[in-house]
Image: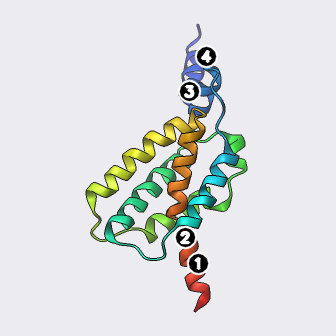
Amino acid sequence: MRTDLVLLLAAVAALPGERAMAAGAVPFDIETAIAAFRAGEAKAPTTYDIGYLSRCNGRWVVHADAVDDGAFPADAEARFPDEFRLPYAITAMDYFNADPPEIESMFDAQNKAERLLRLALAGEKEATRHYFEALGRCSLLAQTVGASAD
């Protein structure tokens, strides 16, 4: 086999969406992701403690990395609402940045988000729901509403 073909096949196999499709898994469900995010937003608090800030920051770090790395299938990414895109994720990371953060809460949230995201990208709807609902609970909607009320 030619070297460039081997490299191409290795690159395609490394893409989560392609791996899931090759294995016969259900593709990533963008509609479930959007609905779960909105459900999480509805549950988002308007005040935060240091642990909450740290958990939200950890979740958004994972999401920003995933979007920046192109982890989501292109067809899903094309349908992303603004809240799933990189500029929003970076803004949310900054907004929920506690100084100093509660390290254990932040790392626990990152680890859980990473596990859920891997499963979501493999097409598992429950993982998709949990991942995006948690992100929705860390939405900037409360900040926007509070800012517009002034």
Q: Which residue is mark 3?
A: 11
Q: Are dots 3 and 4 in contact, CB under 8 Å?
A: no
Between 113 and 126, the residue placed more toward the observer is 126
What separation in Å lies between label 3 and label 1 (alpha carbons)?
40 Å
Q: Is residue 32 left or right of residue 114?
A: right
How far is mark 2 from mark 3, CA to CA? 35 Å
- From this view, report whether residue 118 is shown above or below residue 140: above
Asked if residue 55 lies left or right of residue 130, the reply is left
Residue type at numbered disc 1: Thr
Residue mark closest to the camera, 3 vs 1: 1
Residue 58: x percent and y percent? Answer: 40, 56
Q: Say whether disc 3 or disc 4 marks the residue closer to the N-terminus.
A: 4
> Which of marks 1 and 3 precedes in the sequence?
3
Q: How many marks?
A: 4
Q: Residues within 10 Å of mark 4 (few under 14, many from 20)?
A: few
Say if mark 4 contacts mark 1, CB within 8 Å: no
Distance from disc 1 to disc 2, alpha carbons, whole Å, reads: 6 Å
Percent position of residue 44, x then y? 52, 67
Which residue is disc 2 drawn over? 140
Identify the amino acid type marked 3.
Ala
Tell me which residue sits at (62%, 86%) in the image: 148
Amino acid type indicated by mark 2? Leu
Of tags 2 and 3, the one toward the viewer is 2
Residue 42 percent across, percent down from the top left: 59, 66
CA gap between label 3 and label 4 equals 10 Å
Q: Say which of marks 2 and 4 sits in front.
A: 2
Mark 1 is surrounded, within 10 Å at the Cα level, by few (under 14), some (14 to 19) or many (20 or more) other residues, namely few
Answer whether labels 1 and 2 touch (C-beta < 8 Å). Answer: yes
Mark 2–mark 4 Cα distance, whole angstroms, equals 44 Å
Q: What residue sits 34% from the left and 69% below the top?
A: 98
Task: Tell me the residue that label 4 is attached to.
Answer: 5
